[in-house]
Image (tube, coloured by chain):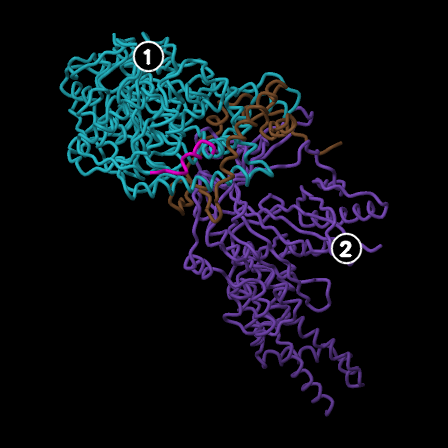
Chain colours: A brown, B cyan, C purple
Amino acid sequence: MISKEEITRIADLAMLDLTDSEKNEYAAQISSLLDYFKQIQSLDLAGVEPTNHALVADNVLREDKAFPSAGQKCVIAGAPDTDGQSYRVPAIIETEE
Amino acid sequence: MTGNFIEYSNYEQMPLHFKPAHEIRRMLDSKEISPAELRAHIAGRIKKYERLNAFLSVIPDAITSEIGFVSASKTDNAGRAAASVPVSAADNRYWSDIPVALKDNIATKGIKTTAGSKILENHTPIYDAAVVKKLKKSGAVIIGKTNMDEFAMGSSTENSAFGATLNPWDTTCVPGGSSGGSAVAVAGGMAYMALGSDTGGSIRQPAALCGVCGMKPTYGRVSRCGLIAFASSLDQIGPFTRDALDMASALDAICGHDPADSTSSDIKFEPLFDQIKNSADFSKLKIGIVDDYFGEGVDSGVTLQVQAAVDQFKKMGAEIISIKLPHTQYAIPVYYLIATAEASSNLARFDGVKYGFRAPEFKNLKEMYMKTRDAGFGAEVKRRIILGTYALSSGYYDAYYKTAQKARTKIKEDFQAAFAKVDLILSPVTPATAFKFGEKTADPLAMYMSDIFTISANLASIPALSIPCGLSDGMPVGLQLSANYFQEKLLLAAAYQYQKHTVHHMRFAAGCSL
Amino acid sequence: MNYEAVIGLEVHVQLSTDTKIFCSCSARYSGNEPNSNVCEICSGQPGVLPVLNKEVLKRAVKTGLALNCTIAKRTKFDRKNYFYPDLPKGYQVSQFDMPICENGSIIVNDSRAEVKKDKKIGITRIHMEEDAGKNTHDTAGIHSFVDYNRAGVPLLEIVSEPDMHSAVEAKEYLEKLKVILKYINVSDCNMEDGSLRCDANVSIRPAGQLKLGTKVEIKNMNSFRGVQKAIEFEIERQTKLSEAGSKIIQETRLYDEAKGITLTMRKKEEAFDYRYFPEPDLPPYDITIEEVNAIKATLPELADAKFERYTRDMLLGDYDAALIANNPPIAAFFDECVKTCNNYKALTNWLLGDIAKKMNELSTADIFTTKIRPQHLVQILNLIDNQTISGKIAKTIIDEVFSTGDCVDAIIERLGLIQISDNSLILTVINEVITENPKSINDFLEGKQAAAGFLVGQIMKKTKGKANPKIVNEMLYAELAKLKKA
């Protein structure tokens, strides 16, 4: 059983401001999902390579050749808040006073 | 329940909106219909069936203005007036003037693309997805963006932030998901082809539930460039069509190597339309079936129709071979652990900084993030982000994520062993026909279990398609065929031959036949 | 109690490729308007996918080889997940458990030692990753502003072993690392403009204890001197805490260059949990022995090998050899000179003496930004050797080369600097001087040797310094001897 505290910690990592009732609901639902999912832990997977990538060919590279960028007006046009040049966000505070 | 469908015995009988695209192509080429008439007709259909909520946005230029309409087919360099010359199958302008729809998680430059989420409710991409560029090049008229479960997470389209899409066969039922809008657009005569995305069955399941064809090509066959990612190692774009032949021409338009997608396959794609149309020999085909897929947990009505399809294939000369896929019983945990883990990371970019929604009130940066994401995402998306974050978090990574990645290897190996013995694997698409709205929303596991037959193909990266194989209580039943990597041709040839001998794909919901 | 400091450095180096690591935007972003050097990929638009820049992989391997690393046969990228406004995707594409290079080392030369003393600093790993954007802050502390011009610029993170025990050693490690990276030409390596950045992990432990103390990470150091000062401050801070019996907290601290102190970074409510997992959008990369060898073949001779050659084959002193070997442009200049000049000692003296002084005056560290070229110096040395010019004239010529870049012959001709070695001409001048200075002659004849020096000076003055001093000396003494006899 995943505790509400655990869900709070995970929600914090995922930057989700869950309400108390959401936390309780998710704690219960995710607990029962994980109970069901635990069955894979009974598989004998010793020496099995994980499938980190789907069906892919290795070594996909591109030439180091520049193309014109999309440009400022284009990328910031859809932003919720800008100063006309940069994305504007609430102040990032790095040090403690 | 009977009498909720209309069956046509030939294309002439069919109203314009239900005809397959290859018939429309012929009519356009022979000037039996003009592009304007076709456009007006489809525009009328979309308006008329607005209540089904298949579309999130309709592209006004494509519908109303001659210039706008043609512009979609004139954006390439060919410089030839659309449909003024008969278009052959080998011509890469096969889709000229034919209205098609796109799932709303496929980026369209200058056209709103929401992925069914409030967090992208006002998002307009600055670039076209690779498939959009290809469709434009083939001359297709992109008429609109279709409804979907938010970020393709769901099996019912009930998770759309913009309201559910209704199943045209019974509007009290879900159309399936997550590409429900695309399935309904094709089933309801509002588009001749629609693209969806399939991460765990999101094309095949709604295709089955709405009685149309849907296909997930081999992973890497279609560029994912511009597909708003749900689970990167599982996502694949694919078409919804009326029949196998249209599926071939749809794949011809969208498949192929894209150097801008590192996971795109560089194995040469040979155009399928002519190959499928001229395919005949069927006698030596070996079809595998997994006995467990026909037993407990599958509705008898579904079993009956799928069994009938097995008999049909036998009659056509195929050899039916019993096979085992022992690790697919673990597919649901493996899938949900991998998909949610990847999703938790893929959805981190929606943070209120660069695009889309930002919460109106917050005291500081962290609160801006948390409130934006809490209000911007729906319940299922948040549930999956939490699950995926948990599976990747310190202390649980090995037990959940890494174990799931290893089990995925076992599932892949099962399929490789099976394809050493058989050419195709046949199964139901879903354990049951379309369910009622709200029936499974309270129980995530029950909802996830409805993906049991489809998710293995994503985990194994193999191609699979869903075609109509009959009705159960008046609701469509889907037949799934899957094949080994890059064997799209084999799949479509089998589906084409099956459809030559059956009428299931000629049936349409009576509710939207007029 | 005596404490020993234990220091490990994490260095981020921006690669000077043409384009960013995963998209085709230019990697040269400085001076551009905010968010003008961006596309859908590096600004993290929904649906975009990365494709690795070939040159990044190549330069990573080259760096690994230059730092004596083992190059991975197979390498992959991973996602490092965290939220920060300068991180457009909410994750950084980096490398976790299969880095491109591992187990390398750098030999640091201890400059404090009388005799050159080498110390090996281990390099744990080198991995490839994408740079983040840049945040700026308003003065009111209400808003921050985000610019993605830098987002996606290729970085190598070079992680050292905790093998350093003083701030000076850390600085020397950085200096040596920079020299090597300059030699292989993978990065601009400029701390001031951010193309080389350094974080330090600092702990202390009682001398003789094996167990490591609590580690503090220091960020925000903007110069080599800053690194040294910050580490010095931090060692002192930790030592004082320990001596006072206080606990050292594991944390990240920011260096405040103006105040010369470190400050606690805003504490996170949660410990970092980056949830690394393999990047599904980027297939792995296999690197064959042939590819490694091909890159190895392009490696230039590096500082340590040059030092060996200079001291062993050219018999330069350790100090001079190190000065040349650790300055890639000077070394290149020197190596070009020695192709046609085997007076190594003279070359070294001129390079590290007058030429270095000129460069100082011009405030340049790169000799190739000045107008002097190897052929200038070689020709000047040849002219000194065959006594065509004096050392004094050589200096005049060097000054002139630095200001005009003209060839030596043209300068000599223009300024009329050829040394006079014509005996009859010199004899004429000597006789003139003897006639004009009877008092000095008397002094000399009375045994005052200093008078001869005065006479030489008079001769040089009359010839404007161009007379060959050796010939002047010989001939003057011969003439004076004649007078003596008479």
Label 2 marks which chain's residue? C
The CA span between labels 2 and 1 is 77 Å
User: Hey, which quadrant is residue B184 in on the image?
Assistant: top left
Q: Which residues are magenta?
A: B324-333
Q: Nearer the viewer, residue C478 or B125?
A: B125
Q: Quadrant of the N terminus of chain B?
A: top left
Figure check: B34 above or below C271: above
Q: Which mark is residue B491?
A: none
Residue identifier under label 1: B168
* Residue placed most toward the observer, C11 or C37: C11
x, y percent for residue B407: 45, 40
Residue kind at label 2, given as amino acid type:
Glu
Instruction: Return the residue nearer the eye: C356 or C324.
Output: C324
Number of numbered callouts drawn: 2
Under circle 2, the secondary element is: strand
Q: Quadrant of residue B335?
A: top left
Which type of secondary structure does the marked residue at label 1 adopt?
loop
- Look at the picture and state if B462 lies above or below C354: above
Residue C328 as seen in the image, left or right of residue B72 = right
- Judge left or right: residue C267 versus residue B229: right
State the residue position of label 2. C4
Residue at the spot 57% in from the left edge and 58% down from the top edge: C104
